[in-house]
Amino acid sequence: MKVKKTVKRIGKYFFTLEHKEEEIISQSILILDNGYTWLGHLDSAIEQIENYFPKAEISVLTFEQRVANLQQISPSLKFILPSQRLRPRRYQLALQLLKLRKARYDFIFLFSLDITPLIISLLFFTSKVILYNQWGQWWTLRLRNIKEVFKITYAKKKARFRLKHLIKMIGLFFVLLQREDENALRHSILVVDNGYSPFGQIEFAIQRIKDSFPKAKVSILALQQRNQLIYDFPAIEIIKPGRCIIKRYRIARHLLRLRKNRYDYIILLSLDVSPIIISILFMNCAVLLNNQWHQWWLIKPKSMKAYLMIIPRFILNIIIFAYLLFSVSWMFFKRLTNIFRYSLSGKKA
């Protein structure tokens, strides 16, 4: 038990927990409407987005003259209008998007391959960027790595040569487009059950996931003795870990085997150290904790800034301590001096 507590204490120096309540699994979505997209096309996209994310907060970055028509599509939409002071006017939408870079959106939806908002979305946001093109196809976009530089994934229709098209071709050289259709909107979620959580806690977590992601693919990684999960959740995939020499690490070992799976979320039901380490280090997804009090916490590694601030904080604490020590010592010294003077004046009298 002492070793376990020591490991947890060490883990506090590398990982942070942020209390997020349930908004962590309610998506925040930004739609970019450049003013030229056919409203019927937008209607189709918004309807599908709302079906996949019924509890999402959907914001639309658009122009003032489009607001009335978009409100008829969905009254729950929130609108962001570009500032009229932004110049040049043709880049108002992209410049306003740049001003929103500190906002946290889970998805950014584009309806054209306009290069300026596309590059801003990929460079200044950590959101998943998705294109819904005029043929009703869903494409994911991300920056290419070195191996993918010369990989062709998106064929554009031939058009008359223009400087604008040349710039777009150069920009798309660094962007990878992959057609995913419904998989672009469908989340893949893994719930990790180490065998100690009550079934009521698991049921609560699954119900909240289904409320926010009704069409998500949900899997549960659980031990062999938790066979009741098969009967409680017949529509959910139950993954059983393989054999391991050290039984208490079976879950963590099998989680490591699943590292190539593209999970959007891994949901832990306890602060078991080994699954946290594997999830943070080897799984490229958000790691959440749903504890026994049904609270949602985001688990993430500490930023480099936090480590860089250790030395300045340490030096600052030393300076403060030295100042307080000097101040207190000086006060006692003055007090002793006054007492000594008073005693001398008494003897003379």
Image (cartoon, rainbow, N blue to C red):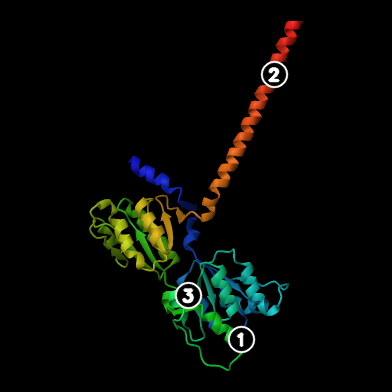
Residue placed most toward the observer, 89 or 191:
89
- Amino acid type for the residue under numbered disc 2: Thr
Q: What kind of element bears circle 1?
A: helix
Q: Is residue 30 visible?
A: no
* Within-10-Å neighbours for mark 3: few <14, some 14–19, many 20+: some
Residue 158 lies left or right of residue 256; in this view the side is right
Q: What kind of element bears circle 3?
A: loop
The residue labelled by disc 3 is: 144
- Amino acid type for the residue under numbered disc 3: Arg
The residue labelled by disc 2 is: 337
Q: Quadrant of the N terminus?
A: top left
The image quarter containing residue 242 is bottom left
Task: Look at the numbered discs 3 and 2 and tell me whether their residues touch, using CB distance below 8 Å.
Answer: no
| Residue drawn at the location 41% of the way across and 58% of the way down | 280
The residue labelled by disc 1 is: 164
Q: Is residue 310 visible?
A: yes
Task: Look at the numbered discs 1 and 3 and tell me whether their residues touch, using CB distance below 8 Å.
Answer: no
Residue placed most toward the observer, 272 or 75:
272
Pointer 3 or 2: first along the chain: 3
Q: In front: mark 2 or mark 1?
A: 2
* Real-space CA distance between mark 1 and mark 3, rounded to the nearest whole angstrom: 22 Å
Measuring from the top left, give residue 172's x and y in whole percent: 52, 81
| Residue drawn at the location 43% of the way across and 57% of the way down | 288
| Residue drawn at the location 62% of the way across and 71% of the way down | 97
Going by the picture, which residue comes out furthest to the right? 349
* Within-10-Å neighbours for mark 2: few <14, some 14–19, many 20+: few
Question: Which labelled disc corresponds to residue 130?
Answer: none
